[in-house]
Image (cartoon, rainbow, N blue to C red):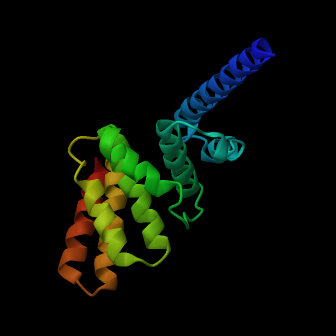
Amino acid sequence: MKRFIYVCAFFLCLCSCSESKYIAEELERTQEIINDYPDSALHSLQAIVPGSIRKKSTKAHYGLLYSLALDKTGQTIDTDSMLRPAVNYFMRKGTNRQKFLSWYCLGRMEYSTNNYQKATESYLKALEYRDIIDDPYLIGVCNFVLGELNLKQNNYQRALFYYQEAYENYQA
């Protein structure tokens, strides 16, 4: 009986490790195609059951990729249930690009829920990484949305500044 329990425990560990490895590999494949094929990336991410992800790093990676896929397919990110843990994780252990993308996605979510003050804060935090990452397009998007946010608050000088910054990034 004891041997049976050990064998079952061994196979359970083996299955959970292989599942976690499968999910991590699927996330890597998804990350490679997300810019060119966001619909396929979103479909791939929707096939993963978030509750089956055990590792914090994998959960953070999944939450960020899922939010990016929603954004790139024109869908709104309406909850931060997966995104907020990703932001918290990447602020401690992520690359500068992951930090930038986390704040960017959080800003998109906050903007779509009309939380303009929080969106402004998130976009400004994302822009703290603008000199470190090499993505003029996304930096331009951050600046453009900051321009819109300032325009909504009748802060025309600041809006113009961010629109000009966006234009310069789009030209790069």
Q: How many marks?
A: 0
Q: Residue at x 23, y 41 (%)?
A: 132
Could you tell me if residue 137 is visible in this image? no
- Left or right of 59, for residue 87: left
Q: Nearer the viewer, residue 118 or 55?
A: 55
- Left or right of 20, for residue 95: left
- Left or right of 15, for residue 95: left
The percent position of residue 146, horizontal first and vertical second, equals: 31, 69
Could you tell me if residue 26 is visible in this image? yes
For residue 21, what is the image quadrant? Answer: top right
118 up-or-down from 140: above or below: below
The percent position of residue 135, horizontal first and vertical second, equals: 34, 44
Q: Residue at x 48, y 40 (%)?
A: 56
Q: Residue at x 26, y 62 (%)?
A: 124
The percent position of residue 84, horizontal first and vertical second, equals: 44, 57
The percent position of residue 71, horizontal first and vertical second, equals: 53, 57
Q: Among all residues in the image, which is located at the extreme bottom? A: 154
Q: Residue at x 48, y 55 (%)?
A: 83
Q: Among all residues in the image, which is located at the extreme top? A: 3
Classify the position of the N terminus by image quarter: top right
144 up-or-down from 32: above or below: below
Q: Among all residues in the image, which is located at the extreme front? A: 1
